[in-house]
Amino acid sequence: MPESKKRIISDIVPAEKSRAEALPMKKTPPVQEAPIENVIEEKAIPTTPKRSGPKPRRFDNSQLDFLRKNTAPGERPTQPARPQRNAGTETSQGSNIPGKKFLVAGASLIVLVLLYVLLSVFSSATVEITAKESQFKLSRPVTFTLPYEEIRISESGEKDGKSINTETVNQKAHGEIAIYNAFSSSSQVLVINTRFRTKEGNIYRIQKQVMVPGATVVDGEITPSKIITEVVSDTEGEEFNVESGTTFDIPGFVGGPRYEKFYGEAVEPIDGGFVGEVKIVGESEAGEALKSAEADAITTANNILRDSIPEGLVALAEKEISVADSSIEPSIGDPGEKFTAKATATGSFVLIDEEKLLSELEELLFDDFPGAENNLRLIDNTGIVLIKKDSSTGEAIFELREEINVSWLADEEMLTTALSKVKVKQIPDVFKQYEAILSAEVKFSPSWWRRIPSKPGRIHVEYR
């Protein structure tokens, strides 16, 4: 029985009843066979035609169950269509892959070539050299004359500090007043300690004798004259501190015609009066602050001097930089929670041409100096002394004394040319050819580009 019919029967009849015995088959009479030759000749054997198109798809049990539930009775389930491949597209995409690879490889090669060219053109190297040093002792002083320029330096330094010590003080107020004469055109003498009095009755005394000039009288009109002098309160205390503009009379003139015509007026606050414990500027903290201020002034002056020297000139001291003036405000021993230390450093120098100076040294000290291979440089100005300046000619006389400290310098043009022709591993061999070089180190820019530039102009020489 066909399989489909079996399934239908099994769905209707219970399983136990569907297992019936097989029905007896009706016997079919035997067919007389014809000779094979006759059959072939009379009629061709029928063959089953081949189906065109895709093979039927086989379903598993779960797929069959789904089709049963979703297919109407009598309707033949159809196979889902398979997605068709675009053979032309697949072939086109596959054929583009090698082309893209070649394009990426070519672009990468061009970038690498451009990077190499840029680095070869713009890279540089710096040679840091430690030169050999020599010291020459002179058996006798040697003089020479060179043109010069002058430069003077003056710089200040400050340092603030806090007072540590505390003391009990009794301090008088002090300040300045103007004394007016509106009495007559005649001058008036006021002796030392002449008293001046505020309206509150506080007494102040002048600290020296003064001559108050006579008033100006024009057509009977009097214009007062004045003189300014210092006054100090009679006793200690804050109550003697007054503001600028406070007026004073002179008790000594009470009862006479001069009393209302001579008077005083504070031209600044009169202060400083105090009784009690206050911070006092101590010698220890003030001394430390002053040292710091002096050191700052000297350092600043030296830095200004160094920055002020044009390239190619050497500064020789006429007067070395030193502290010319210093102060503490308030002074040591005076009241004050804070104080300021100030210092001023000055110096004067002559500037001379370095090449001319070295030329003079070579001529005086080294008759057989190999100038074609080495150069001379002063390590410092020790032993070179200014003897005399002539401002009319602009020349000065210098003297070489005791010891001269110099260093030998390699010829930079020859050195950079030699380095530009070698590879990195051959650099030490180039340095060995120069006796003037004690040690040397090459720094590349950029640091990861380990190649010496082929152009000497991109190789820079610096001395440590």
Image (cartoon, rainbow, N blue to C red):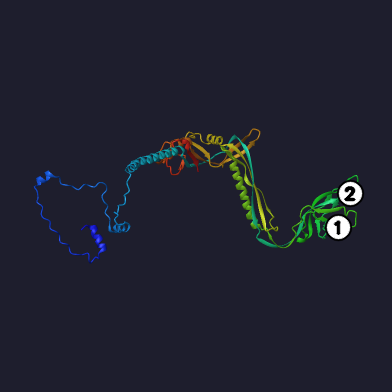
Q: Pointer 2: residues within 10 angstroms few (<14), some, or many (20+)?
A: some
Q: x and y percent of residue 275 in the render?
A: 74, 62
Q: x and y percent of residue 116 in the render?
A: 42, 39
Image point 51% across, 35% down: which residue? 366
Circle number at residue 251: 1
Residue toward you, 94 or 221? 94
Circle number at residue 29: none
Compared across the picture, whether 174 is left or right of 463 comes to right
Compared across the picture, whether 359 is left or right of 338 comes to left
Residue behind mark 2: 184
Quadrant (top left, top right, bottom left, bottom right) of the N terminus: bottom left
Image point 25% across, 62% down: which residue? 10
Which amino acid does the dot numbered 2 rest on? Answer: Ser
Q: Is residue 236 at least partly visible in the picture? A: no
Task: Check if mark 2's residue and mark 1's residue have beta carbons within 8 Å.
Answer: no
Residue toward you, 181 or 145? 181
Q: x and y percent of residue 36 in the render?
A: 10, 47
Compared across the picture, whether 80 is left or right of 277 comes to left
User: Judging from the image, what secondary structure is the residue with disc 1 in?
Assistant: helix
Does label 2 or label 1 sit earlier along the sequence? 2
Which amino acid does the dot numbered 1 rest on? Answer: Pro
Residue toward you, 49 or 217? 49
